[in-house]
Image (cartoon, rainbow, N blue to C red):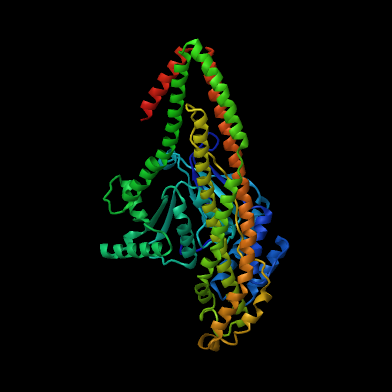
């Protein structure tokens, strides 16, 4: 989070490769379509739109000549339009391209808005202690970014990253955008297998004493808990002091960086690595068990081998029939029921926040009789309310998509385990590799009330006569109630439409995973029986099997 909102690109620091040496910078510029979309989003704040860049530049000049920009929203979007106009002639021909730059150019593309507003992402290949551990750092756009696409991008990184570092400044109060971002983190925190979120209060050296430092830490922790982030891992530190200590090669511990680094690297080395090792060890154990059985089978007498050949063919046919009869319908029904239940409660949760959003949008500082255009201010307040509510619906849908994805994974794991047990009832010695399915389905959601006809709210807006009567009489309450009622049907339509889209995607994903699991079971079953029959027929010598078994045992010991 930052006290100064920007439209910064997505910045990445990555380990060097054979192709990209230390200091190489790749800059991906936005496409023509994406750039024009961003410009029109800002023009819309001033009731303007443009069909191409030439017209957009003329509209920006027109806006510049008009009256002062009253709201912070107008100022933020006007700043973006000014940056676009300033850099357009330089970067017009670069749109849609990926160009290579040097490390010296990196800071300008990150920090200067007349450059960064044209950029989709930047990758810096950098050789240092951190990247040598295989770690890539991604600096996602701040919570205050005016680029609507950034919300979906940030959520994808929240979902797919191995660790999340949320950095706040010592004396920076939480803004509305910060609050909404943290609420989203709180929504999804419990969906992750590991607690991968680290919260950092930087510039703690500004505290006058330990008491003030503890007071700030307690405040931030209370805010995180308020926004739904239970038991946050919180680290007050000073990056400035830590940098000086690292340069001097002496640590006093006052910077607070060591405590964070210890927790972070322990998480990377232990928690994440243990998950990978556990999966590898399970497959290694399975392989050792398979080799032992092959050795034993190859050493049996001919009569016993013949009996087992017949038994194996019977078991193979029975398992084939079992797998052929399997269908995903029961899994699909359970997924549908879970998704419908999750989506059902979204509307209730969002409208519980309606009064707070209304008070923030229709506030005395926004609607005051100081010579400003009150009709324009009133429309801006309505847009603010619709944006806040619509954004919350979209965020809830994103969080729900993650919950459904985790439920689908749970369903498939349970099914995989059940199918394995049923197969082993037919062939006791049969064993399978651990469940593994990675599904990369992605979906994003627009703000719920984008494109909604504003005439729907004409009656509600008519309750505003002037600021004094609006806030001192009953007009504010009447408008709030009317807006609340007007938004019920559009909200239901959004949830119905997006809910069907979400369910269709996950139903397809579930079927894809189901088919993959059945194929995996069939292949592993065939491999197992073929290897057994091969051992009976002397296809692989006992000496070779025993040598492989010894190698696996040594590998297991060395890994331990």
Q: Position of residue 508 (x, y in %)?
A: 63, 46
**Residue 446 is drawn in which quadrant?**
bottom right
Residue 73 vs 205, above or below: the answer is below
The foreground one among 211 and 484 is 484
The foreground one among 458 and 505 is: 505
The part of the image, by quadrant, that contains residue 99 is: top right
- Residue 519 picture location, percent across and down: 60, 33
Q: Nearer the viewer, residue 396 or 309?
A: 309
Which residue: 61% across, 62% down? 495
On the picture, is 25 further left or further right than 269?
Answer: right
Give the answer, above or below, for where 70 lies relative to 333: below
Residue in front for this viewpoint, 261 or 399? 399
Q: Which residue does the image show at 50% across and 11% down from the upper left?
A: 303
x and y percentages locating residue 261 in the rendered image: 35, 47
Q: Report whether residue 103 is seen.
A: no
Determine the residue positioned at 43% across, 16% down: 547
Horizontally, is 427 left or right of 30 in the view? Answer: left
Where is residue 313 drawn, in percent x and y?
57, 22
């Amino acid at each position: 989070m930052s006290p100064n909102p920007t439209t910064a690109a997505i910045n990445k620091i990555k380990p060097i490769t054979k192709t990209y040496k230390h200091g190489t910078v790749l800059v991906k510029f936005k496409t023509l379509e994406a750039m024009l979309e961003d410009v029109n989003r800002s023009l819309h704040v001033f009731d303007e739109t443009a069909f191409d860049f030439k017209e957009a530049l003329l509209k920006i000049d027109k806006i510049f000549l008009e009256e002062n920009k009253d709201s912070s929203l107008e100022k933020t979007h006007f700043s973006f339009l000014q940056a676009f106009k300033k850099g357009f002639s330089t970067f017009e021909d670069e749109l849609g391209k990926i160009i290579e730059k040097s490390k010296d150019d990196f800071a300008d593309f990150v920090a200067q808005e007349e450059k960064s507003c044209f950029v989709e992402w930047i990758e810096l290949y950098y050789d240092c202690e951190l990247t040598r551990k295989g770690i890539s750092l991604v600096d996602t756009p701040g919570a205050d970014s005016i680029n609507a696409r950034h919300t979906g991008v940030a959520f994808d990184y929240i979902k797919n990253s191995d660790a999340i570092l949320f950095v706040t400044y010592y004396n920076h109060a939480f803004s509305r955008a910060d609050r909404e971002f943290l609420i989203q983190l709180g929504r999804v925190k419990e969906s992750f297998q590991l607690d991968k979120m680290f919260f950092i209060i930087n510039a703690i050296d500004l505290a006058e004493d330990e008491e003030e430092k503890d007071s700030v830490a307690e405040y931030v922790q209370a805010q995180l808990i308020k926004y739904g982030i239970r038991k946050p891992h919180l680290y007050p530190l000073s990056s400035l002091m830590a940098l000086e200590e690292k340069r001097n090669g002496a640590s006093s511990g006052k910077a607070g960086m060591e405590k964070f680094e210890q927790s972070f690297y322990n998480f990377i080395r232990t928690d994440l690595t243990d998950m990978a090792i556990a999966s590898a060890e399970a497959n290694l154990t399975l392989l050792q068990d398979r080799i032992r059985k092959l050795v034993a089978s190859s050493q049996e007498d001919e009569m016993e081998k013949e009996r087992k050949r017949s038994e194996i063919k019977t078991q193979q046919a029975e398992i084939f029939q079992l797998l052929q009869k399997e269908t995903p319908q029961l899994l699909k029904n359970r997924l549908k029921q879970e998704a419908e239940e999750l989506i059902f409660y979204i509307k209730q949760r969002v409208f519980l926040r309606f009064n707070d959003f209304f008070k923030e949008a229709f506030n005395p500082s926004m609607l005051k009789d100081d010579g400003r255009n009150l009709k324009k201010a009133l429309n801006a307040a309505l847009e603010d309310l619709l944006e806040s509510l619509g954004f919350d619906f979209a965020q809830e849908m994103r969080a729900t998509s993650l919950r459904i994805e985790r439920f689908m994974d749970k369903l498939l794991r349970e099914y995989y385990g059940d199918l394995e047990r049923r197969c082993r009832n037919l062939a006791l010695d049969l064993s399978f590799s651990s469940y593994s399915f990675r599904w990369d389905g992605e979906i994003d959601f627009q703000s719920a009330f984008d494109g909604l006809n504003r005439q729907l709210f004409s009656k509600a807006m008519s309750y505003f006569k002037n600021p004094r009567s609006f806030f001192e009489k009953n007009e504010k309450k009447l408008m709030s109630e009317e807006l609340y009622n007007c938004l019920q049907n559009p909200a239901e339509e959004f949830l119905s439409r997006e809910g069907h889209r979400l369910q269709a995607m996950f139903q397809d994903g579930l079927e894809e995973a189901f088919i993959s699991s059945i194929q995996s079971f069939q292949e592993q079953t065939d491999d197992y029986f073929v290897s057994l029959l091969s051992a009976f027929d002397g296809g692989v010598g006992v000496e070779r099997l025993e040598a492989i078994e010894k190698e696996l045992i040594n590998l297991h010991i060395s890994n331990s």
